[in-house]
Amino acid sequence: MVALLVALAAGVGAVARYLVDLAVQRHVHGELPVGTLLVNVTGSFALGLVAGSATGTTAAVLGAGLCGGYTTLSTLAWETLALAEEGSHRTALLNVVGSTALGMAAAALGLVLA
């Protein structure tokens, strides 16, 4: 039963990621993939909150399911490699370092607040 709940939450997270990224792309134009950055930072913050406040089934559903489905390392990697292949090496470096640093800071903040 827990696995089914995690899968359902992951589906909700994936749809939310798509919608957030789509909304950001409509309003922000440029080289830096701001939609993925926003998703990963807010997802890291949410995971910090979950890690600091939830246990058991709730932690699994919200952490592995919802936050895991919402955030995306694979898209970060793909977008960073695409930037590098296009010759935008500084933007690629900013993307990976900035996303990692901001994500870690957001997760820590969420954990502290929880």
Image: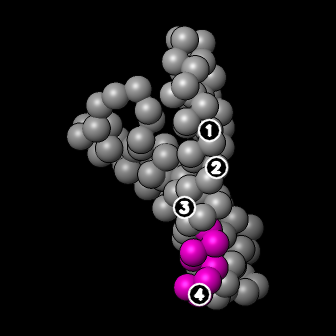
Check disc 1: other Cα within 10 Å, few if <14, some if 14-19, many if 20+.
some
The disc at residue 114 is 4
Look at 38% across and 50% down and name the residue there: 20
Q: Which of 22 and 48 is in front in this view?
A: 48
Task: Judge whether residue 112 is colored magenta.
Answer: yes
Task: State which mark lies toward you, 4 or 2.
Answer: 2
Task: State which mark lies toward you, 1 or 3.
Answer: 1
Bounds of the magenta segment: 107-114
Estimate the spatial distance between the alpha carbons at disc 1 and disc 3, rounded to whole Å.
16 Å
Task: State which mark lies toward you, 1 or 4.
Answer: 1
Residue 29 in which image quadrant: top left
Look at 64% across and 88% down and name the residue there: 53
Q: Given the current orientation, which residue lies at the most extreme front position?
A: 90
**What amino acid is labelled 3 in the image?**
Gly
Task: Judge whether residue 75 is colored magenta.
Answer: no
Q: Determine whether label 2 and label 1 are within 8 Å by CB.
A: yes
Residue 63 in which image quadrant: bottom right
Q: Which of marks 4 and 2 is nearer the N terminus?
A: 2
Estimate the spatial distance between the alpha carbons at disc 3 and disc 2, rounded to whole Å.
12 Å
Q: Position of residue 14 (x, y in %)?
A: 52, 51
Q: Which of marks 3 and 2 is nearer the N terminus?
A: 3
The disc at residue 96 is 1
51 relative position to 84: left or right: right
Dot 1 falls on a residue whose secondary structure is helix
The disc at residue 35 is none
Q: Position of residue 38 (x, y in %)?
A: 45, 51
According to the image, label 2 marks what residue?
Answer: 100
Q: Quadrant of the N terminus?
A: bottom right
Q: Earlier in the sequence, mark 1 or mark 3?
A: 3
